[in-house]
Image (cartoon, rainbow, N blue to C red):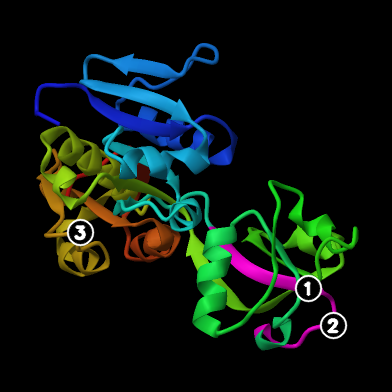
Amino acid sequence: MNSTSALKIAIPNKGALSEGAVKLLLAAGYRCGRGGRELIVRDPDNNVDFMFLRPRDIALYVGRGIIDAGITGRDLVADSGAEVSELLALGFGRSRFCFAAPKGTVRSVEELGGKRIATSYPELLRQNLKKRNLSCPVVKLDGAVEISVQLGVADAIADVVESGSTLREAGLEIIGDPMLHSEAILIGAGEEIQDHPDIRRLIGRIQGIQVAANYVIIEYDIQRSRLEVCCKVTPGLESPTISPLSNPDWVAVKAMAPRSDCNRIMDELHALGAKAVIVTEIRSCRL
């Protein structure tokens, strides 16, 4: 594509992947919300056309160059066999692709040799069986894979697992290690798409949101005599911002800090005599 034509980005048309993709893109400043069941939503301000497609079809459209980029699951990309580039992992829609069998009947994946395995991901399953040198009849299903064993259609399954509760309810247990760890990813039609200015902007905005999710801003007032030790508690990324107060013996300090450590940091600052300790969320951030 040339740099003036609208960028075409595919989004899943339903399900958790769709909800996560729309939420992320809205936070990144893109207009991709649907009023109804529109298949295309235009965002003229960002020069993007968003296409709402079946999650399974997105990699195929992107791989054939019909659409420039898309958001879908890594598992669906692998099953499609499409030649696409993973541009960015998005951090939502995490799952595992695993073998499962009736509880207590199979001890290892190797024991599945010759057994019927039901799945909605036939190509991904066949690739893994080939690597293991196992020969198994593959039963392709479009959904409700867990019940296939109870109905006598298969002896085991290979499916995407999130919490594992659905498997347990069906009397199944996971066998062996996951074949694939999946999550929502941004894919492109070849690595060269990363050089397109609109794609660089999209990736930069998403990365800004991802960074912001891991950090907070901590602000506090501290006596100058204790500033040095407090700066060791809140060093920031480069160094904290220090501002004078009307009382010359005190200063205001502002620094980025890991979200996971903010409560411990607040405890330490309070113990050192810091006042007005405030933690603020960050919507987006560029490092």
Q: Disc 2 to disc 3, how far (Cα)?
A: 54 Å
Residue 156 as seen in the image, left or right of residue 64: right
Gap between marks 1 and 2, in whole Å? 7 Å
Give the magenta range.
Answer: 95-109
Q: Is residue 137 above or below residue 58?
A: below
Residue 217 seen in render: no
Task: Count neighbours of disc 2 (C-alpha within 10 A) and say few if under 14, some if 14 to 19, many if 20 or more.
Answer: few
The disc label shown at residue 105, or none: 2
Which amino acid, mark 3?
Answer: Gly
Which residue is nearer to you in this view: 266 or 43? Answer: 43
Q: What element carries label 2?
A: loop
- Residue 4 appears in which quarter of the rendering? top left
Residue type pointed to by label 2: Thr
Number of marks in picture? 3
Tell me: 178 left or right of 270. right
| Secondary-structure class at tag 3 | loop
Q: Position of residue 16 (x, y in %)?
A: 57, 40
Residue 149 location in percent, x, y?
A: 84, 64
Pointer 1 residue: 101
